[in-house]
Image: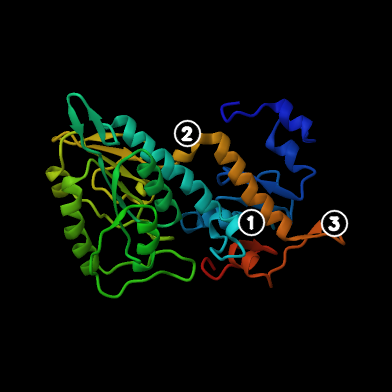
Amino acid sequence: IKSGFSDEAYKEAGAEIVSSNEAGYADSEIVVRILKPESTEGLKKDTLHLSYLDPFNEKELLNKFASDGIQAVSLEMIPRTTLAQKMDVQSSQASLARYVAVLNAAAKLPKIFPMMMTPAGTISPAKVFIIGVGVAGLQAIATAKRLGARVDAFDTRPVVEEQVRSLGANFVKIDLGEMGQTEQGYAKELTPEQIAKQQEAQAKVCEKANVVITTAKVFGRKAPVLIKKDVLDRMQPGSIVVDMAVSTGGNVEGSKLFENVVTENGVTIMSGDLLERQVAFDASLMLSGNISAFLTHFHDKEKNELVVNLEDEIMKGCLLTQNGKIIHERFV
């Protein structure tokens, strides 16, 4: 109901509403959920289970899936390839989260985003600095620009500069030496020296910014701290910093999960975790579209069944357990 859907809508679409997870598991060969399960109790052997699994931090859960004979698919491990793009839950949900992050910052900021010419004088536009320009970062840029802000952006991958400029934002160039991205399109982890150099250059932009949004995550590892206390101390009172990596350690020193923190000089650090929940209607539509695309891809029309084909690079990349053991090379 909070997402904008009623039980009646599900029934009209042909679904049966059950009273418990166990009742649903009893006749199911495929189980889809959003977050990782608290328990595997009731899941039948060989069930194909799809959800976010946080596999790098859930070794015990993976072992339980394996010992129960369940085929566990980790949605966040779906390869970021052209073919799998329509299944990419990470990009779809993060795009919504970045949109919400900009709106939340605009609502909290004691200044308007657009330039406004009034009889009392001209109000200058807000300055927004976005650190990390993946698919989701581009959504944050586009949202801030639509609201009328002046936007600067930085990413360790020089290849995204053209995309940043195409949205009307300024790309901040910081020479960090050799940089690049992984095969899946994630930014490569920086050396301590590169991180220090990035921090120093970013600090100068942060000092002038009204809103800073950090989106720097390293897949499967702790997020790098990019904005330390000394930078926050130099920022303007009333400025907003949204830490989108707070759930993986945080890009901003002092950020807290699901809490807003106000520094001594009046800078607000906002938690940017799971912001897609604030637009749950569209988040649900996009997530269901991703999962439907995954299931359709592996559906054998002639046999009218879903085939778990490990010769397919998509399935090979995200299926973690099968036949009583952990099979993914990164978690064995």
Please name the amino acid that badge 3 sits on: Asn
Relative vertical location of residue 39 with respect to residue 169 in this rendering, above or below: above
Q: Mark 1 sits on what residue?
A: 72
Residue 228, x across and y down, in percent: 19, 50
Counting labels gives 3
Residue at 69%, 33% in the rendered image: 20
Few, some or many C-alpha atoms within 10 Å of disc 2 (few <14, some 14-19, many ≥20)? Answer: some
Q: Mark 2 sits on what residue?
A: 278
Q: Mark 3 sits on what residue?
A: 304
Relative vertical location of residue 248 with respect to residue 268 in this rendering, above or below: below
The colour scheme used here is rainbow
Residue 19, x across and y down, in percent: 72, 29
Q: Secondary structure at mark 2?
A: helix
Return the residue found at the far front: 119
Residue 146, quarter of the rendered image: top left
Return the residue found at the far top: 119
Asked whether 31 or 290 is in front, the reply is 290
Q: Quadrant of the N terminus?
A: top right
